[in-house]
Image (cartoon, grey):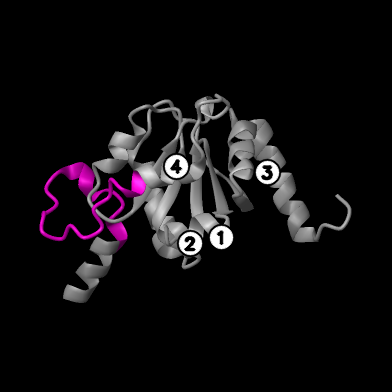
Amino acid sequence: MPGETPNQKVVREKLDEFSSKFKNGGVLRAYLEKNGVKIVEATWRENRKWRLVGVLPEHIGTVFDVRGDVLIFATSFDRLQPRILSEMQEDILDDTRFDRDLCILATTDRRAAALAQQRAGELAVLTINPERLSQPSTPELKTLIAGLIGTIDHFNVTTPITSPPAFFGRSRMIRDITKELA
């Protein structure tokens, strides 16, 4: 494209690859762009996953106090594996540019939202089914975020974590605590 920088060209080419190779990738990309999300990075991850980095439009970021980039994972697994959620959380913890409270997971697994909610903690995982994004009744992104943020108890420090699924994504925390105690 005329006037684009070399970095912009690389991002555009990766997004074009995402749109063509990921089932419903073009639909997801169009939905995000329609909602003002600027994709600044697209990376293929092994094992049927894409990692996108999005910047929310200022008005959405301000309303929901999203202060960094938003991690967007797109996976083509029919059944979501907890390790995908662990990988997302590790990426967020390891990269300071990401907002610590919100990420987006694009998956066709209808159980994904329930699986993400089983984990205690403050990270809100917005699950989006890319197959449904082209429907006229699909809510705007800000509406989906508002519905999700209201379900997360960011201050629940009194309820202990007891179920095994609630421990996924905490390997780095456990490693850091173990190191501090040693």
For the residues bearing labels 1 and 3, Cβ distance under 8 angstroms = no
Q: Can the viewer see residue 105 in this picture? A: yes
Instruction: Name the N-terminal-most of marks 4 and 2.
Output: 2
Q: Mark 1 belongs to which amino acid?
A: Glu
Q: Residue at x 85, y 49 (%)?
A: 1
Q: Is residue 26 left or right of residue 128?
A: right
For disc 1, the marked residue is 58
Q: Residue at x 49, y 63 (%)?
A: 68
Measure the alpha-carbon separation of dots 4 and 2.
14 Å
> Who is closer to the viewer here, 89 or 103?
103
Q: Can the viewer see residue 85 in this picture? A: no
Measure the alpha-carbon separation of dots 2 and 1.
6 Å
Please provide the residue range marked out in magenta. 148-172
Indicate which disc residue 15 carries: 3
For disc 2, the marked residue is 62
**Viewport quadrant of the C terminus:** bottom left
Is residue 76 shown above or below 63? above
Residue 108, given in percent of the width and then of the height, sits at 45, 28
Instruction: Give the mark toward the camera: 2 or 3.
Output: 2
For disc 4, the marked residue is 143
Q: Mark 2 belongs to which amino acid?
A: Thr
Q: Mark 3 belongs to which amino acid?
A: Leu
Q: Can you tell which quarter of the image residue 23 is in?
A: top right
Measure the alpha-carbon separation of dots 1 and 3.
22 Å
Q: Is residue 82 magenta?
A: no
Q: Secondary structure at mark 3?
A: helix
